[in-house]
Image: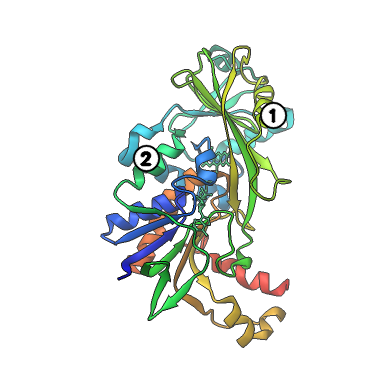
């Protein structure tokens, strides 16, 4: 007999782990499937810094900072052992950037302090510019958090190759469920979701042993973690030329070490381990949280949508997505999981800012 669940989640990264955790708390029967196991995609590679976004008050900054406040409370209350509130310093990269920081200041709507160059030097940080310090920010143990959130959830290593419905239920191998949540990161081959514009950006993290006295994390084009138990993490995800996952590169990790010499003393840093992976972003950099439009049906029944018609949308029943978390998966995931779980279980409204519907008609007009 097939085993039946309320919801099958495909993908056991931070998106899959947070939605599974949130649905379980709402008494849903949940199964998580991942082809390579827990945190085997981008989430396992992440430095997993959880810090606010700076800028001039864009709607993406507002959303990110709502998600940041939610995330740090979520990690502190659910798995504080895996969240290290070291504080994160945002350092301008050059003179022009430093000018922008003074404009950004009035939009810093999370707790912060100004750190002078002298203060930075006293902390062992080289910088010619004054910076923002966010004391509530920090970083997660990426793999540890995903395992923790999934500890009460059934997780099976299984590669889903097709989405099929049988007698009104989703049928995935020997499993059946009313709902499916796609939390597959940059992989998007199970259903036509081209309109969401999901694309991968490659990143590398190097963990280095050191005796450096560094108690705070920082970000300046790359992330540098505080020293914890003799290890600091260096990470960045800006590599757009890598299209499919490849073996992790020691050279890329060592390049991060060289780059970090602008910020810290790297003289005793020894590379211990290299991590790498894809992070998945959406077309407009906002997360993707909601239902999946039946693209084939819409195209066949409303050919005028490519010329600007906007008929009512038809969705694939009981199919949901939680994706597009970009370079801030650990910031966005808890709040996005709450939105999706409340939609699935309690039929609360989705957030328009993250509802993937926003991208559909624009995509149709470009076909
Ligand atoms: C080097 C690096 C550093 C980063 N640093 C930070 C940071 O400091 N702070 C931050 O917040 N974010 C950071 N990120 C981004 C963060 O890692 C991503 O936003 C996050 O991983 C997105 O999680 P996800 O669950 O959506 O995707 P993923 O973690 O990629 O998970 C998707 C999962 O789906 C599985 N899957 C896909 N297709 C199938 C299928 N057909 N069947 C079964 N399983 C399937 C995969 O195996 C994978 O495990 C970083 C990323 C990288 C790569």
Q: CA distance from mark 1 to mark 2?
A: 33 Å
**Residue 247 in the image: above or below residue 343:** above
Q: How is the image coloured?
A: rainbow
- Whole-percent x and y of residue 301? 61, 87
Residue at image coords 63%, 85%? 300
**Image quadrant where one finds the C terminus:** bottom right
| Of the image marks 1 and 2, the number of the one nearer the N terminus | 2
- Report the front residue among 37 and 259: 37
* Residue located beneath label 2 in the image: 75
User: Residue 168 location, x and y as percent?
Assistant: 38, 79
Relative horizontal placement of residue 181, taking residue 80 as reference (left or right): right
Q: Residue furthest front?
A: 1
Q: Give the camera-side residue of 315 and 154.
A: 154
Residue 307, placed above or below residue 239: below
Q: Residues within 10 Å of mark 2 (few under 14, many from 20)?
A: some
Q: Position of residue 266 (x, y in %)?
A: 62, 16
Residue at x 59%, y 12% (from the top left corner): 268
In the figure, is residue 308 to the left or right of 1? right
Q: Which residue is mark 1?
A: 251
- Under 8 Å from ligand 1: the CB of mark 2? no
Residues at circles 1 and 2 in contact by the CB criterion of under 8 Å: no
Q: What kind of element bears circle 2?
A: helix
Q: x, y (%) of residue 177?
A: 36, 69
Residue in the picture at 61% in, 28% down = 91
Q: Nearer the viewer, residue 227 or 33?
A: 33
Classify mark 1: helix, strand or loop.
helix
Pick out the residue farthest to the bottom.
301
């Amino acid at each position: 007999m097939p085993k039946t669940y309320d919801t099958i989640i495909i993908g056991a990264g931070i998106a899959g782990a947070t939605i599974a955790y949130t649905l379980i708390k709402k008494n849903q029967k949940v199964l998580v499937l991942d082809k390579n196991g827990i945190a085997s995609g981008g989430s396992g590679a992440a430095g997993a810094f959880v810090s606010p976004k700076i800028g001039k008050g864009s709607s993406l900054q507002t959303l990110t900072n709502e998600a940041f406040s939610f995330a740090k409370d979520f990690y502190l209350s659910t798995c504080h052992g895996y969240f290290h509130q070291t504080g994160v310093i945002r350092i301008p990269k050059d003179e022009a950037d430093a000018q922008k920081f003074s404009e950004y200041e009035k939009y810093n709507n999370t707790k912060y302090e100004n750190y002078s160059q002298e203060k930075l030097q006293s902390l062992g940080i080289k910088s010619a510019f004054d910076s923002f310090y966010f004391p509530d920010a920090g970083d997660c143990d990426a793999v540890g958090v995903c395992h923790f959130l999934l500890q009460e959830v059934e997780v099976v290593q299984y590669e889903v190759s097709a989405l099929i419905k049988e007698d009104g239920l989703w049928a995935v191998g020997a499993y059946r469920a009313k709902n499916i949540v796609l939390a597959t990161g940059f992989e998007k081959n199970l259903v036509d979701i081209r309109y969401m514009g999901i694309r991968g950006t490659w990143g590398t993290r190097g963990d280095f042993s050191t005796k450096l006295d560094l108690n705070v994390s920082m970000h300046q084009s790359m992330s540098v973690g505080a020293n914890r138990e003799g290890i600091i993490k260096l990470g960045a995800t800006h590599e757009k030329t890598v299209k499919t996952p490849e073996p992790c590169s020691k050279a890329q990790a060592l390049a991060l070490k060289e780059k970090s010499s602008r910020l810290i003393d790297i003289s005793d840093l020894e590379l211990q381990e290299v991590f790498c992976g894809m992070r998945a972003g959406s077309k407009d950099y906002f997360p993707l949280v909601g239902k999946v439009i039946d693209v084939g049906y819409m195209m066949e029944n409303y050919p005028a949508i490519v010329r600007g018609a906007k008929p009512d949308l038809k969705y694939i029943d009981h199919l949901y997505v939680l994706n597009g978390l970009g370079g801030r998966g650990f910031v966005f995931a808890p709040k996005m999981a709450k939105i999706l779980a409340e939609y699935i279980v309690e039929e609360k409204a989705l957030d328009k800012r993250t509802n993937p519907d926003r991208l559909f008609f624009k995509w149709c007009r470009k076909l």
